[in-house]
Amino acid sequence: MSLPDSQLEMRSEPIYELMDVEAIQKVLGRSRASVYRYANTDPRQKILNLPYDPQKLNPELRQNDQEQLLFHPTEVSRFARDVLKIKQITIQVQESIPNETNRLLREILQELRSLNKSLNQSMQNL
């Protein structure tokens, strides 16, 4: 069984650093507790990823409740502008620094694409 190419595609857009609670604290000038209060999470940990809420600060999706809360910079900016009514907010968005892990993952992805292509060609020849 082969995966469709769309599932193997890497994003061509830049990958930006996600913001943790401490970074949001500094940007918004709020306490750690208030950042957690703003976050769209379930304090009882019953539901891991809640539906989008325009009145809350929506974190990125998590796989388990042990993962730290991370937020996309544009979400933080939207929340500050629309909900907190902060007129001017400056969030510096920087591309993540390429590292060895990313390089290896790209190589693995390229190999998987190659294998997928070979399998598809073999299936067509049968």
Image (cartoon, helix red, strand yellow):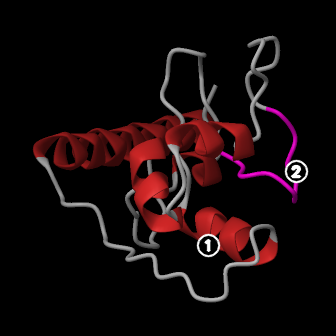
Q: Dot 2 lies on which element?
A: loop
> Dividing the image into 4 quarters, which one contains the N terminus?
top right
Question: x%, y% of residue 103?
Answer: 18, 49
Judge by depth and name the residue closer to the eye, 80 or 100.
80
Which residue corresponds to the image point at 32% horizontal and 48% vertical from the top-left? Answer: 110
Q: Dot 1 lies on which element?
A: helix
Which residue corresponds to the image point at 59% horizontal and 22% vertical from the top-left? Answer: 63
Judge by depth and name the residue closer to the eye, 90 or 104.
90
> Dividing the image into 4 quarters, which one contains the C terminus?
top right
Q: Relative to 63, does residue 116 appear above or below in the rendering? A: below
Q: Looking at the rendering, which quadrant does residue 48 occupy?
A: top right
Question: x%, y% of residue 89?
Answer: 54, 81
What is the span of residues highlighted in magenta in the rendered image? 50-60
Identify the residue position indicated by label 2 in the image.
Answer: 53
Judge by depth and name the residue closer to the eye, 90 or 29.
29
Q: Residues within 10 Å of mark 2 (few under 14, many from 20)?
A: few
Which residue corresponds to the image point at 28% horizontal and 41% vertical from the top-left? Answer: 105
Three-letter code, disc 1: Ser
Identify the residue position indicated by label 1 in the image.
Answer: 77
Marks 2 and 1, how far apart in space?
Answer: 15 Å
Q: In this view, does 15 lie to the left or right of 87?
A: left
Magenta span: chief secondary structure: loop
Which residue corresponds to the image point at 28% horizontal and 38% vertical from the top-left? Answer: 108
Q: Relative to 49, does residue 102 appear above or below in the rendering? A: below
**Can residue 52 be found in the magenta stretch?**
yes
Question: x%, y% of residue 15?
Answer: 40, 63
Q: How crowded is mark 1: few (under 14 residues within 10 Å), some or many (20 or more)?
A: many
Q: Relative to 76, does residue 3 appear above or below in the rendering? A: above
